[in-house]
Image (cartoon, rainbow, N blue to C red):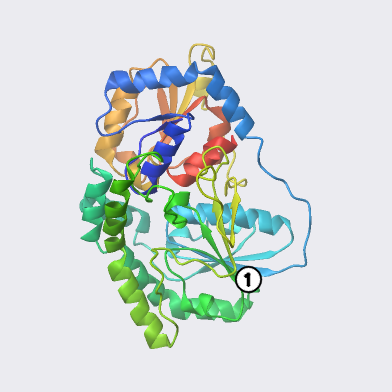
Amino acid sequence: MIVMPLGGDQWDNAQRVHEKGFGIRLNPQTVSEQELLNAIEKLLNDKELKHNLSVASKHFLHLSHTWNQLTILLAPLEAVGSVNACIGLAEVLLSRGHRIVFAVNQSFAGKLSPFGFIEEILNDETGKLPAENAAKSLLASGLLSDLTPEESMEMMCETPIFADLIDKMRANEPKLKTIIAKYNPDVYIIDDFAGSPTIIHSNKPWIHISSSQPLSGIRDDRTPPGWSGYPSDSDRQKWSPFNELKKNIFKSQIIKYNKWMEEEGHPLHTANKSILESPYLNIYGYPEELDYTDIRPIPEKWIKIETFMRKGEQEFKIPDKFRDRNVEKCKLIYLSLGSMGSANVDLMKRLVSILSKSQHKFIVSKGVFGDTYELADNMWGEKSVPQTKVLPLVDVVITHGGNNSVTETFSC
């Protein structure tokens, strides 16, 4: 695995993959042609790494126990990674006989019912192209530029990303109440930075899942700060200033959230954390080989699974243009910078140019603006590809380091 992080917990995943010996960390903005091509060849010829990854992929549990049917409502963050992680968990729950209801925004309309889930839309944004607009906003913010983690933190302090999430959640609250009244869920599952008061202050249990890298969800003084990309054995004198910088990002969000809670007559959020933890159960997904359990224990009321990997994506076959290749000399490689990273068309063009010099073939997830640039002759791609079906077919993965991408790569 080659991890080329662009920000947030991607830096943490890139560092952890590197320091645990499961891949190579590179800067996508500055990596030279020779560095990237050499990294590909190094991984292709690393027999020990192939063996270790093969062992890692066998850790996944397959439970056969069944329970009485429950109605479970999932309310994920309006983000591809969050929704995909919830789909992975919900598929398992559905297979156990439970009724699954998703409350999602318009951008995910029609994408959940094929899995067998009940799909409820919180808002109507027909024609607004939410994915494209979100990508444009992120590009305009400068957060996809070549930044250090510290520079990214400072820039995010000036960008109301997380405070805006509270506004959206509050706008969706009346419709969410209607959905809850319709289905009367037994259990709620959320993957978000904050919790709807209708959910977290109900008389029903709610579960928080953390689809992000573990350092983002579990704060422990023995581990590096989340979103820093610091090595686990780095100078701890740097950790405290970074944590203080990170707290500033969520300051306006917490103020706005607490104002809402006060108006609703609910307790205020006083914990010094950006993510709200459930008093019932919290779940994170991360491979044992990368996890920080060699540094800290799993906290009380937290459990770990290996991945939230989806199973029910559409089938994928190797493109016709690649089927007759010499598989010994010409390997198959997957390139994806995630739903938002791939929106940086200039960066995608740069990587395409470098990788066009390789003897290997590439499957490329082109992103929301994929129709604005061309791939090289040794490539095939679409705006979006069924990642979980592509991963078992390739020899090397080049990823931005999003948590779903890292954990799904390990599972294959």
| Residue 69, percent from left and from top | 74, 67
The residue type indicated by label 1 comes to Val
Q: Is residue 337 left or right of residue 181?
A: left
68 in relation to 35, above or below: below
77 in relation to 333, above or below: below
| Residue 314, percent from left and from top | 58, 43
Q: Is residue 31 left or right of residue 319?
A: left
412 in relation to 179, above or below: above
| Residue 277, percent from left and from top | 49, 66
Q: Is residue 78 left or right of residue 34?
A: right
Q: Nearer the viewer, residue 368 or 287?
A: 287
| Residue 87, percent from left and from top | 57, 55
Picture quarter containing residue 171?
Answer: bottom left
The secondary structure type at the circle numbered 1 is: strand
Picture quarter containing residue 28?
Answer: top left
For the point 31% across and 61% down, the residue is: 247
For the point 41% across and 75% down, the residue is: 269
| Residue under numbered circle 1 | 187
